[in-house]
Image: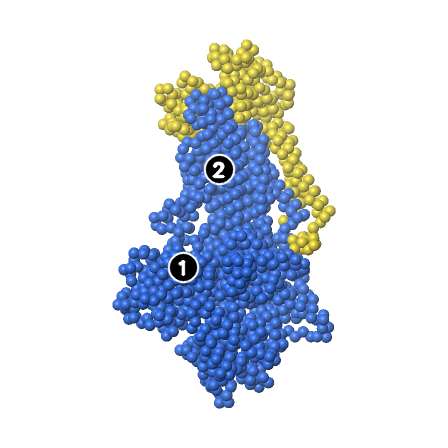
């Protein structure tokens, strides 16, 4: 792999081929009018526009409307197989084939379906309200004759001229005509589109600049011909026909819906795409209904049970038919000659078929209808606990965590890969100027978080590897001192004007001037306080400016041609204001990776200031400019290691003549028209950015959100993989990777990107391929190289990181390449995708989800993350920052990234276990109960008679066994939340699916089968034909049925008591309460005459019979012995992690033997290759290595 | 849930169950029982080939005398049961065919639930209606010892609550068994249902196709080696469905009748438990796993494998 290729980029420009993931490929303006480019916009001319019938700006994201709600929602409900089955049985219960009363079949179904539909309806109503809010926002629209009036967004049409004011959202995709600035620029915040908070500049066509006030739109007429609606955010192709001239349009003139006008008092624009045609709406994918893995598996089990049900029903009906054919004619006591068609000896086949239906209903207890209700209820309660968790309460915003959809709780416990957005999620998008190196001297005593932790670790004795890191964190959080926003820099050598006393004060002066002058930011003076805030294109620049201000160089005013700086310490007579004339500004882009200003100071000297990536600057240094190169390089490496992002600063003094000759050439290049203008400009810029003199370097810390590195660290220890998907530039993304410890020094980076346009073109020429194919080829070989590299790596500690950029990703996501890409990505410890569009985020998520086949979790905060949040198995939105789109689309919302740890490791772990155990238990108890009914059939001529009273059966699932299992689902915890957090490795039980694998499910089913056999046959043999009482009475069907049912109640409730590991009074109440309820019920039921043969059965028949109690005891014990054997075996020979920890806790060993406890806690962390711990380890290794070399006499200087 | 605790649990179960099982077995062994099948024996040799003809022909005398020998001393009260086999009293069609309301309140509650035996051929309601009542068992037994008649008490053989609450004191049989197709026994139309104890017992449908129902109680002791003659009026037709009929004389104690199974089941379960407790105790002694032994944690195990 050639390193020169790694950082090469292709600029995003609409004219150069296809830039988006799936935008229409275009060859410039030539395609306009062709297929895919049919849109015609008659500006300011509703008469001509109307017939084209483009949709209005009304948007709707609801699933249903008032008319479709009932049919659609009901249809949705009955798409669940189990519900359909219950519907069928409910219908059949109205016919005489049903063995039960119809009410007992219909009522539960109506309850279940009604509850679910109510939930659906409420959710949709919330979406509707949200839509209405957006649709009713107001915007000034041109009404004709130069008058503008406010109208609702939804009334906006294609072709309307609108006036958008400062800090308003654009109501639709607009073509920028003019702005409050003379040169037609405006600043746009695209937070909701790509998550970037820095401002972007849009510039109108020169032709439309005169349209700068309301009046001028009186006679404005123009036609736009452009591409059809498509989801590509970064492309636009179209022509603008105005005053008999045709102008080409590019994305630079397009203002997208949901982005915000900033720093510009107003703009005028023409609506191009409205409503669902707009790019941001095209990017939104239909919100899918998500179901958890466990629930999907549960469906499979339900299918299995259906099969069993069909099988035993078939056996029953065949048995019935045979009996009817052969025996019924002899059973005179049944009066077979008076049969109806349900049991007609002459037509046994028909009767058999009818009986099949009866049997299907009768054995329906195998498939627990209450399972769905119970799970729904349990999940709502679990969600309630998540919402109420005080440890996930954010004091700053006052937001708690919120489970917005409750049906994914258990999925939280099975997450394998976390896909995270960067800005606003991991970082606060705030830069802190932390250190700098000037003239070969490093300044700044502040330390980055990584350094602090490493220092602490070292101080505590680096031989003790088992020192738990929490302690470091805990201490770390305390000594955070808030300095001025954006600057945590402190070094008395530079502050308060002291720098003038430093030996290299002239270089320091230059350094500060570069900071204050070399940027594109705009100052904003706060009227009230007089303080100045900076609106910068990138947050780094903001940090530089704030730092410069602290050093005494306050940038306070920018005009078209000048920058004004208030300097405190440069002249003896105090603060002076200086004006610097800007001659040229060579902008930053990801390809150049540098930015240059050429300016004339008050003395008339022409200076060139250049800042950029160190490698770029170092290549351009003059021979005499390399004085500090060695020292600076060393400092840069130190900074990089500490997770800081660095830039090198340099300058050059220009001669008047040299400058003017260059400027002429530059102007020529600037005014040239055609696709090679960019290249020309670049070439010319390159000419002047040479012979630089190095001044120093800056180190900026990208401020992470609170607790992010710790959280990532713990998630990594819990065995989760973390991918970062960001819309940022590659450098930024890599820097953040360093800051949050996803990347570290010594990690082997595999960077995938598409070579630059001309390079590809050259390759293409050589091998006679199209540009696209060449790009693909190149990417393919890069991936192959990467995989090879990973394969050949011998060192088990070696970690790889994959960094891929958006364009490469577009190819890598294509069908033929995506598996190769994925395989490589899985091998890497961390994956960072940069420059990705919202759609690509969703596609990557889908790739991971489908490719790995494990649960994915996507977390993000902006509208650009919506696709990914919806696509992932679990979507988590960060609430509390601007924009609610992510939260609205998410399944869970938390207010800080760090709460993700608790959400997954504690709640996810618990919910997973709870639901898994609950479902297993449900199947167990219904099999144990349902099969006894079947066995009885064999003894009742397969007639469909149940040994139990109808009421018993109805109450079995609803009252007598439901509450304990619900309490299991809501309150069960194997270990406490602290232990979950201390032993992140316990989380792996979820992704490994230890509690819902087939072994366990079949085990429980087997247990159910055994219990059913034990219950039925033991009772049968005991109550066979003998007297049951001293009074000589024999047992009739009611007595046998009631005894059996008593045994079932005891057995299943004892079973759940054995299953639970966490008992509070609630569990005790529910378990023992259920058993008591049974006795109370049978007493009360025995009092009513409705009970038939069960009249006073407990008081008169069974209560006084010792054999009844003896049988209950025997059967209960017999049913639970296998489970007891199982847990005995597991506990004594094959304990799981949580068992051991339970024992340690139970025996209070953790208190007695603290070192053991701590040792285990640190061991429990997975060997991680990413995350903070790994990084500190690496750092320690490195320092140790150094110590080794230099000998023990060296003392370690650790900062802070 | 420590291993020790589990071993103790098993042991406790075993220690309770085994003696209790032995005790049950002991109790069961004290029950004396005489069981005599008579459905074949009571058919005259001439009709052995065609038993249905015999039972359906009302002209043939159905009387039949059996001689049984008392093997053990039987202490009063001795319960007399009839035992039917292969009779599906638990068939759904049969179980459904009754009306509790009619039994309690009388003819006006006759309804479809009794189908197909609810109206007679004149359209009058049949009381008691339904297949169960219609197929009432009607063999009778008389016991003599030598020339001495042994009295059989036919009262109080049904549950008190049935007599008190479920079968009406003012409900009298009417139109019962007067159709062309006669099922089982007839009822005295002058006696209210609440006193028709044979019917009350019969109406308690059995759980299994083989069942015993109480016929009466002999309230005197029977000595060993005594010979008892039983005069049976073999009216009930079990021949069409090849059901067996037996007469059973049995004593009872607190556990009921002879019930070895319960005892054995307790003993087996108990000894299983003890066996398990010994097994796990052995495992525990042989390769003990100290409580909270950290070596069993998965991360430590992985290391040891490496």
Pick the quarter of the image with the N terminus of chain A: bottom right
Q: Nearer the viewer, residue A177 or B128?
A: A177
Query: Which numbered tag is attached to residue A31?
Result: 1
Residue where numbered disc 2 is placed: A364
Q: Is residue A1109 above or below residue B213?
A: below
Residue A190 on image: x %, y %: 43, 65
Residue B195 on image: x %, y %: 45, 25
Q: Nearer the viewer, residue A178 or A833?
A: A178
Q: Is residue A319 above or below residue B139?
A: below
The answer to whether residue A115 is left or right of residue A638 is left
Q: Colour of chain B?
A: yellow
Mark yes or no: residue B25 visible: yes
Within 10 Å of disc 1 (Cα), the crowding (few <14, some 14-19, many 20+) is some
Q: Colour of chain A?
A: blue
Residue A485 on image: x %, y %: 50, 74
Q: What residue is drawn where x is 61% and y is 74%?
A: A633
């Amino acid at each position: 792999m050639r390193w020169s290729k790694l950082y090469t980029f292709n600029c995003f420009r609409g004219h150069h081929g296809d830039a988006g993931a799936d935008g229409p490929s275009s060859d410039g303006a030539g395609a306009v009018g062709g297929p895919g480019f049919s849109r015609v916009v008659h500006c300011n001319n509703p008469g001509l526009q109307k017939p084209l019938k483009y949709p209005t700006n009304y948007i709707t994201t609801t699933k249903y409307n008032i008319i479709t709600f009932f049919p659609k929602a009901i249809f949705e409900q009955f798409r669940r197989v189990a519900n359909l089955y219950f519907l069928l049985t409910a219908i059949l219960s109205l016919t005489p084939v049903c063995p039960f009363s119809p009410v007992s079949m219909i009522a539960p179904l109506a309850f279940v379906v009604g509850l679910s539909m109510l939930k659906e309806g409420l959710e949709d109503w919330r979406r509707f309200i949200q839509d209405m809010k957006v649709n009713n926002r107001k915007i000034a629209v041109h009404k004709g004759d130069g008058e503008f009036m406010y109208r609702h967004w939804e009334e906006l049409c294609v072709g309307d001229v609108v006036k958008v004011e400062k800090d308003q959202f654009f109501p639709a995709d607009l073509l920028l005509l003019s702005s409050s600035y003379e040169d037609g620029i405006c600043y746009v915040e695209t937070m909701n589109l790509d998550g970037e908070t820095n401002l972007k500049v849009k510039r109108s066509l020169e032709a439309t600049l005169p349209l700068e006030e309301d009046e001028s739109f009186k006679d404005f007429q123009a036609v736009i011909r452009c591409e059809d609606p498509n989801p590509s955010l970064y492309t636009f192709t179209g022509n603008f026909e105005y005053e008999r001239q045709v102008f080409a349009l590019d994305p630079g003139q397009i203002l997208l819906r949901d982005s915000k006008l900033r720093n510009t008092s107003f703009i005028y624009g023409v609506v191009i795409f409205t409503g669902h045609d707009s790019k941001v709406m095209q990017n939104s994918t239909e919100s899918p209904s998500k179901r958890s893995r466990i629930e999907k598996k549960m469906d499979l089990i339900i299918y299995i049970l259906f099969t069993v049900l069909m099988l035993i029903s078939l056996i029953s009906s065949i048995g019935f038919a045979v009996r009817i054919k052969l025996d019924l004619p002899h059973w005179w006591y049944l009066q077979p000659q008076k049969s109806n068609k349900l049991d007609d000896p002459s037509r046994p086949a028909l009767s058999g078929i009818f009986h099949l239906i009866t049997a299907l209903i009768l054995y329906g207890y195998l498939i627990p209808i209450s399972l769905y209700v119970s799970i729904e209820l349990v999940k709502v309660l679990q969600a309630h606990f998540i919402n109420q968790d005080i440890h996930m309460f954010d004091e700053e915003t006052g937001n708690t965590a919120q489970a917005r959809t409750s049906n994914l709780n258990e999925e939280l416990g099975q997450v394998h890969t976390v896909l995270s957005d960067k800005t606003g999620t991991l970082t606060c998008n705030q830069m802190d100027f932390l250190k700098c190196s000037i003239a070969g001297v490093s300044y700044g005593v502040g330390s980055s978080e990584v350094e602090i932790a490493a220092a602490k670790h070292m101080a505590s004795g680096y031989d003790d590897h088992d020192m738990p890191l929490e302690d470091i964190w805990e201490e770390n959080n305390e000594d955070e001192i808030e300095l001025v926003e954006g600057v945590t820099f402190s070094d008395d050598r530079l502050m308060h004007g002291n720098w003038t006393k430093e030996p290299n004060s002239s270089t320091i002066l230059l350094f500060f001037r570069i900071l204050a002058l070399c940027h594109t930011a705009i100052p904003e003076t706060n009227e009230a306080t007089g303080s100045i805030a900076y609106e910068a294109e990138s947050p780094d620049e903001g940090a530089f400016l704030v730092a410069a201000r602290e050093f005494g160089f306050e940038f306070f005013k920018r005009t078209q041609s000048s920058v004004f700086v208030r300097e405190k310490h440069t002249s003896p007579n105090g603060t002076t204001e200086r004006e610097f004339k800007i001659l040229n500004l060579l902008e930053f882009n990801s390809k150049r990776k540098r930015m240059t200003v050429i300016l004339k100071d008050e003395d008339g000297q022409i200076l060139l200031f250049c800042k950029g990536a160190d490698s770029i600057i170092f290549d351009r240094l003059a021979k005499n400019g390399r004085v500090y190169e060695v020292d600076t390089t060393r400092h840069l490496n130190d900074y990089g290691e500490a997770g800081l992002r660095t830039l090198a600063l340099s300058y050059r003094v220009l001669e008047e003549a040299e400058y003017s000759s260059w400027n002429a050439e530059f102007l020529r290049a600037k005014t040239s028209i055609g696709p090679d203008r960019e290249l020309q400009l670049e070439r010319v810029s390159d000419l002047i950015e040479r012979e630089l003199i190095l001044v120093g370097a800056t180190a900026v810390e990208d401020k992470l959100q609170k607790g992010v590195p710790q959280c990532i660290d713990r998630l990594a220890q819990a065995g989760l993989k973390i991918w970062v998907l960001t819309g940022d530039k590659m450098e930024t993304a890599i820097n953040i990777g360093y800051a949050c410890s996803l990347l570290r020094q010594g990690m082997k980076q595999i960077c995938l990107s598409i070579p630059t346009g001309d390079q590809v073109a050259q390759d293409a020429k050589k091998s006679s391929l199209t540009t696209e194919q060449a790009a693909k080829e190149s990417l393919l070989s890069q991936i192959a190289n990467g995989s090879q590299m990973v394969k050949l790596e011998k060192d088990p500690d070696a970690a790889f990181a994959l960094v891929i950029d958006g364009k490469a990703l577009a190819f890598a996501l294509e069908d033929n390449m995506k598996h190769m890409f994925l395989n490589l990505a899985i091998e890497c410890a961390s994956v960072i995708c940069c420059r990705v569009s919202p759609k690509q985020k969703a596609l990557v998520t889908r790739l991971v989800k489908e490719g790995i086949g494990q649960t994915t979790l996507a977390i993000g905060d902006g509208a650009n993350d919506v696709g990914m949040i919806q696509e992932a198995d679990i979507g988590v939105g960060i609430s509390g920052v601007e924009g609610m789109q992510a939260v609205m689309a998410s399944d869970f919302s938390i207010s800080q990234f760090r709460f993700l740890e608790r959400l997954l490791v504690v709640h996810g772990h618990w919910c997973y276990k709870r639901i898994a155990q609950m479902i297993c238990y449900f199947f167990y108890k219904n099999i144990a109960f349902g099969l006894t009914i079947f066995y009885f059939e064999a003894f009742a001529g397969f007639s469909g008679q149940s040994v139990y009273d109808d009421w018993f059966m109805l109450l079995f699932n609803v009252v007598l066994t439901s509450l304990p299992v619900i309490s299991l689902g809501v309150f069960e915890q194997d270990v406490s939340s602290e232990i979950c957090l201390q032993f992140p490795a316990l989380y792996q039980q979820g992704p490994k699916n230890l509690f819902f694998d087939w072994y366990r499910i079949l085990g429980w089913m087997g247990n159910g089968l055994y219990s059913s056999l034990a219950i039925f046959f033991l009772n049968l043999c005991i109550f066979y034909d003998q007297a049951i009482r001293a009074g000589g009475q024999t047992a009739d069907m009611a007595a046998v049925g009631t005894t059996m049912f008593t045994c079932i109640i005891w057995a299943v409730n004892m079973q759940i008591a054995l299953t639970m590991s966490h008992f509070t009074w609630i569990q005790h109440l529910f378990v023992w309460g259920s058993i008591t309820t049974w006795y109370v019920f049978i007493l009360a039921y025995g009092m009513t005459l409705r009970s038939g043969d069960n009249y006073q059965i407990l008081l008169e028949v069974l209560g006084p019979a010792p054999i009844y109690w003896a049988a209950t005891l025997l059967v209960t014990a017999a049913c639970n012995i296998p489970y007891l054997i199982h847990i005995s075996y597991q506990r004594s020979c094959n304990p799981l992690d949580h068992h051991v920890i339970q024992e340690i806790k139970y025996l209070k060993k953790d208190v007695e033997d603290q070192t053991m406890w701590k040792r285990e806690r640190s061991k429990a962390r997975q060997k991680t290759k990413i995350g903070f711990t790994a990084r500190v380890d690496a750092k320690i290794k490195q320092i140790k290595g150094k110590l080794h070399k230099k000998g023990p006499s060296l003392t370690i200087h650790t900062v802070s | 849930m420590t291993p020790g605790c589990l071993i103790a649990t098993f042991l406790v179960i075993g220690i309770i169950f085994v003696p209790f099982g032995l005790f049950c077995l002991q109790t069961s062994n004290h029950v004396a029982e005489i069981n005599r099948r008579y459905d074949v024996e009571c058919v005259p040799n001439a009709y052995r080939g065609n038993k249905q003809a015999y039972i359906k022909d009302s002209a043939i005398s159905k009387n039949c005398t059996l001689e049984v020998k008392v093997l053990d001393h039987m202490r009063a009260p001795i319960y007399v049961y009839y035992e039917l086999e292969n009779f599906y009293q638990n068939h759904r069609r049969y179980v459904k065919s009754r009306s509790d309301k009619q039994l309690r309140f009388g003819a006006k509650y006759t309804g479809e639930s009794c189908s197909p035996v609810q109206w007679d051929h004149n359209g009058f309601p049949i009381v008691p209606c339904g297949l169960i009542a219609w197929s009432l068992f009607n063999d009778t037994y008389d016991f003599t010892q030598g020339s001495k008649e042994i009295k059989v008490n036919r009262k109080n053989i049904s549950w008190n609550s049935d007599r008190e609450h479920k079968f009406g004191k003012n409900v009298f049989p009417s139109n019962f068994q007067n159709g062309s197709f006669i099922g089982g026994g007839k009822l005295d139309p002058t006696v209210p249902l609440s006193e028709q104890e044979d019917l009350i017992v019969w109406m308690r449908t059995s759980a299994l196709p083989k069942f015993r129902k109480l016929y009466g109680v002999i309230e005197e002791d029977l000595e060993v080696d005594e010979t008892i003659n039983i005069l049976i009026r073999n009216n009930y037709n079990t021949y069409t469905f090849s059901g067996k009929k037996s007469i059973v004389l049995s004593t009872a104690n607190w556990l009921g009748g002879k019930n070895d199974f319960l005892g054995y089941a307790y003993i087996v379960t108990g000894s299983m438990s003890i066996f398990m407790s010994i097994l796990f105790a052995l495992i525990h002694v042989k390769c003990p796993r100290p409580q909270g032994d950290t070596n069993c944690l998965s991360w430590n195990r992985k290391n040891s494998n490496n």
